[in-house]
Image (cartoon, rainbow, N blue to C red):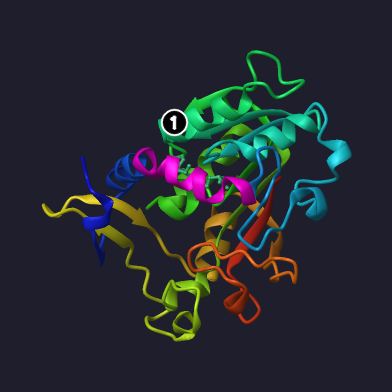
Amino acid sequence: MTDDEDAEAVRRQAGGRESSRANRGWWDRNADEYQNDHGDFLGDARFVWCPEGLDEADAGLLGPAAELRGLDVLEIGAGAAQCSRWLAAQGARPVALDVSHRQLQHALRLNQGVPGLGDEGFPLVEADARALPFADGSFDLACSAFGAIPFVADPERVFREVRRVLRPGGRWVFSLTHPVRWSLADEPGPEGLAVLASYFDRTPYVEEDAAGRTVYAEHHRTMGDRVREIVGAGFRLVDLVEPEWPEWNQNVWGGWSPLRGRLLPGTAIFVCRRD
Ligand SMILES: C[S@@+](CC[C@H](N)C(=O)[O-])C[C@H]1O[C@@H](n2cnc3c(N)ncnc32)[C@H](O)[C@@H]1O
């Protein structure tokens, strides 16, 4: 068992299978703490896109909430599936997918006793976003709030898979850490305002154990890289949302804070359409 406290943070290469395997283990070990720390802010059945607190009920990035009824929606990197629970409440038919068994156990726990969900709830699928276990054209929409994309070495592969399982005209909307944050220290205070590394350095952030094994990996791309990945996979980029920090939000989430949020974007949300 890895003690994540003792892991060493380095910048070095980490491949596709290596990153997925490491992140599955990391999220299994850390799911309880994540839900404990952030569950209240996320809400059990809200669709919160980011630490800035942008709520899908206000933002409508998936389209008007009234038009979600009856749609098949895939949530990727769903964690405890808070977003899927909100989608189900709008009358959509969500499927929540995550690579971490422990995260999905939290989803199962939160599903129990939700009025209107029924005993079965909605499907929870344990799988890697790099190989989606669904037939072509299974979904009307796909979404992801900080799930999977920042953690995979080969996002082009995920985008191709999402395109494959979407029906023509379907939207693919996902959020991730704003690429500009990669050049700053990941700290919520003033020390997080200084440029420490090149924005253009795509070397992954890796945590490794004493034997040098990867136990966690995050992958950086520039804004331009992301646009090319999206277009290269056959999507049209419809909007790019950089949520501003709202006055009401005094929450600190890792490196996200009111101080930094008022000065710099912390999240990028890409709204794409499969033609
Ligand atoms: C920051 S959490 C976000 C969870 C949820 N969307 C939320 O907002 O709380 C990232 C999630 O992505 C999942 N994840 C990481 N790599 C993945 C992969 N390759 N395939 C599917 N899920 C992945 C993790 O297990 C974790 O639950």
Q: Is residue 71 left or right of residue 236?
A: right
Q: Quadrant of residue 89?
A: top right
Q: Is residue 101 left or right of residue 170?
A: left
Residue 134 in view here: no
User: For disc 1, does the CB lie below 8 Å from ligand 1?
Assistant: yes
Q: How many marks?
A: 1
- The residue range painted magenta reads 27-41
| Image spot of residue 1 (x, y percent) | 20, 39
Q: Is residue 41 left or right of residue 248?
A: left
Is 1 placed above or below 53 here? above
- Looking at this view, name the residue that lies furthest to the left: 211
**Mark 1 nearby-residue class (10 Å; few <14, some 14–19, many ≥20):** some
In the rendered view of the protein, which quadrant contains the C terminus?
A: top right
Residue position for label 1: 127
* Residue occupying the point 62% across, 74% down: 258
Residue type, numbered disc 1:
Ala
| Image spot of residue 8 (x, y percent) | 22, 62
- Tell me, yes or no, whether the highlighted magenta stretch contains residue 39: yes
Name the foreground residue: 253 vs 227.
Answer: 253
Residue 117 in view here: yes
Name the foreground residue: 274 vs 246.
Answer: 246
Is 65 placed above or below 212 here? above
At mark 1, the secondary structure is loop
* Residue occupying the point 43% across, 71% down: 186
Q: Quadrant of residue 45?
A: top right
Q: Is residue 149 left or right of residue 22?
A: right
| Image spot of residue 72 (x, y percent) | 71, 28
- Tell me, yes or no, whether the highlighted magenta stretch contains residue 61: no
- Looking at this view, name the residue that lies furthest to the right: 66
